[in-house]
Image (cartoon, helix red, strand yellow):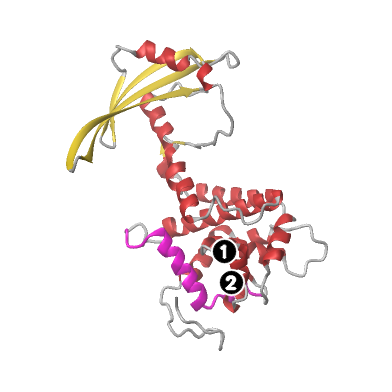
Amino acid sequence: MPNCSGAGKGSCLNKLSGGELPRFVRYAQKMFHLQFLAGACTDSRPFPEIPARAVALTLLLGEVVQIPSQLQLQAETGLWQWQQWVGYPDSISDDTLNYVSERMDPEQWRRGLVWINRKLKRGKAFEESKVHGLLTVSLDANEQFCSDQERYDIYQETLALTQGQPPQETVERDGRKVEIWDVPQMTFSDSYTEPVRVVRARETYLQRQRIGGKWVTQEKEQNWIWVVAGNLDGYDGASLRDWGHLRWKIENNAFNELTQSWHLTHCAHHHPVALQVLLWAKIMAFTLFHAFVILHGKLLRLGKVTLQELRKRLYRSLLCEDVAPFFSG
């Protein structure tokens, strides 16, 4: 950790040359009007001594630079550098952070995130996720209770209808041979009687693994069944398979990283409203950080630095850079 001193408001015995935090703030200001986004996150206190904007910026900055707890966040707000960043000239206690987050409106945070994603979409940040010109919105869910998925006979019917039949399409995806069967006009369930289209994909590939101290190459097989509702008749089965596999980006690029590096499973405050606010703050910080390092920066794209190292650089830059022109006052 650099040895920084508050004396002189800007002296740093081990001055960093990168200035990652000022660049991040300039980017967030220019592209997403971060100051106004934070100002829109108000709370219900009638006469607040500490502005809600300072609390909102503290929650966001704490997530970006990887502060895992409210107590540690309280300690960080005692730094003059932090106070300049959020525009409040004093520390903010963990009790205050919890108290204010209980009285914020989660919908305001959600609208702010919608604004950010609309800006990213207009800036063509999601182009690589398009298939045949369509942008796919993938949803993932966690099953909390036992479902009746086994009632759906459509899967067994699809396997029976395609068994022994030649595939209608054969394509290659990432070194995999993908055979596709397309079955229209299937009945999904007793409660959903509209006809649906079912696409079955059998993917075969070679996998090299170590068995008994020796490297062995084995052929692997995966079978996927995609149920399609809606007007997608103009798109072939390969496109539907590709859309279906885009769902894994949520697992690999969102949930895994949020859980392992962004403390997604840790709840800093268990109040029902605060829980939502803190979750929206985490997701907003996650989105802003990734937009900055992926779209604006080059080091990550060139493979010269990891995401976690960039977050550490942002924190070190916070301690050693003058950020007063951005949010003070």
Picture layout, residue 241 above or below residue 97: above
For the residue carrying disc 2, how many other residues have a C-alpha within 10 Å: few (<14), some (14-19), or many (20+)?
Answer: some
Q: Real-space Cα distance between discs 2 and 1? A: 9 Å
Residue segment shown in magenta:
303-329
Which secondary structure, mark 2? Answer: helix
Q: Is residue 28 magenta?
A: no
Contact, mark 2 vs mark 1 (Cβ under 8 Å): yes
The quarter of the picture where the N terminus appears is bottom left
Q: Main secondary structure of the magenta part?
A: helix
Q: What x and y, as percent, mark residue 101?
A: 70, 57
The quarter of the picture where residue 248 lies is top left
**Residue furthest toward the front?**
212
Query: What residue sits 30% from the left and 12% below the top?
Result: 165
The quarter of the picture where residue 241 lies is top left
Query: What residue sits 45% from the left and 78% below the top?
Result: 2
Which secondary structure, mark 1? Answer: helix
- The residue that disc 1 covers is 62
For the residue carrying disc 1, how many other residues have a C-alpha within 10 Å: few (<14), some (14-19), or many (20+)?
Answer: many
Task: Compare residues 15 and 278 and report the one nearer the observer.
Answer: 278
- The residue that disc 2 covers is 76
Picture layout, residue 68 above or below residue 75: above
Q: Amino acid at mark 2?
A: Glu
The quarter of the picture where the C terminus appears is bottom right
Query: What residue sits 57% from the left and 76% below the top?
Result: 81
Q: Amino acid at mark 1?
A: Gly
Q: Is residue 328 magenta?
A: yes
Q: What x and y, as percent, mark residue 232?
A: 47, 24
Task: Compare residues 126 and 78 and report the one nearer the observer.
Answer: 78
Q: Earlier in the sequence, mark 2 or mark 1?
A: 1
Which numbered circle lies on residue 311? none
